[in-house]
Amino acid sequence: MMKQNSWYPLCFESKAKYESWKDARNYAHEVASVCDDCDSDYSTEMQRQKRCNPQDAIFNSTNSRKPCKQKTIQNFT
């Protein structure tokens, strides 16, 4: 996995919305990944739509060098 400038989480509607989230996180001086801010209802919906990929999202969106918690993904088949 490699951090890339063009990458953004599938759960965001666009790269612009992801950049806005990052700006707000940095302005608040938070240490977080997008998964830290995801509520259970949104997570469930994104999983249902196959738009939840916490492994890449946590790796690419965190602003911390500490290991991040892993989220559990439900299997919607």
Image (spheres, helix red, strand yellow):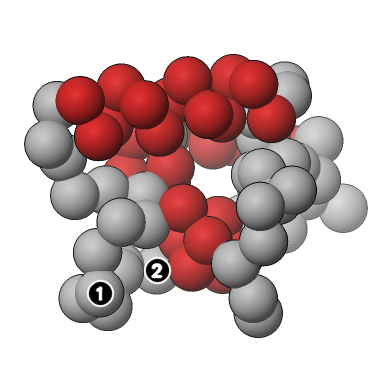
Outermost right residue: 77
In this view, the mark in front (2 or 1): 1
Q: Quadrant of the N terminus?
A: bottom right
The residue under label 1 is 65
Residue 21's spot in the image, x, y percent? 43, 25
Q: Secondary structure at mark 1?
A: loop
What is the quadrant of residue 45 in the picture?
top right
Say whether residue 8 is left or right of residue 49.
Answer: left
- Name the residue rendered at 65%, 44% in the picture: 9
The residue under label 2 is 70
Residue 38's spot in the image, x, y percent? 41, 34
Say whether residue 41 is left or right of residue 1.
Answer: left
Work out how far the residue at label 2 is from the one at label 1, CA to CA, in angstroms: 15 Å
Report the front residue among 27 and 73: 27
- Name the residue rendered at 67%, 61% in the picture: 4
Q: Is residue 17 above or below residue 57?
A: above
Q: Residues within 10 Å of mark 1 (few under 14, many from 20)?
A: few
Check disc 1 and give the amino acid type: Arg
Q: Earlier in the sequence, mark 2 or mark 1?
A: 1
Check disc 2 and give the amino acid type: Gln
Report the front residue among 39 and 56: 56
What is the quadrant of residue 54 in the picture?
bottom right
Q: Is residue 60 above or below residue 5?
A: below
Report the front residue among 46 and 27: 27
- Residue 60 visible from this viewpoint: yes
Residue 24's spot in the image, x, y percent? 30, 22
- Name the residue rendered at 37%, 57% in the picture: 62
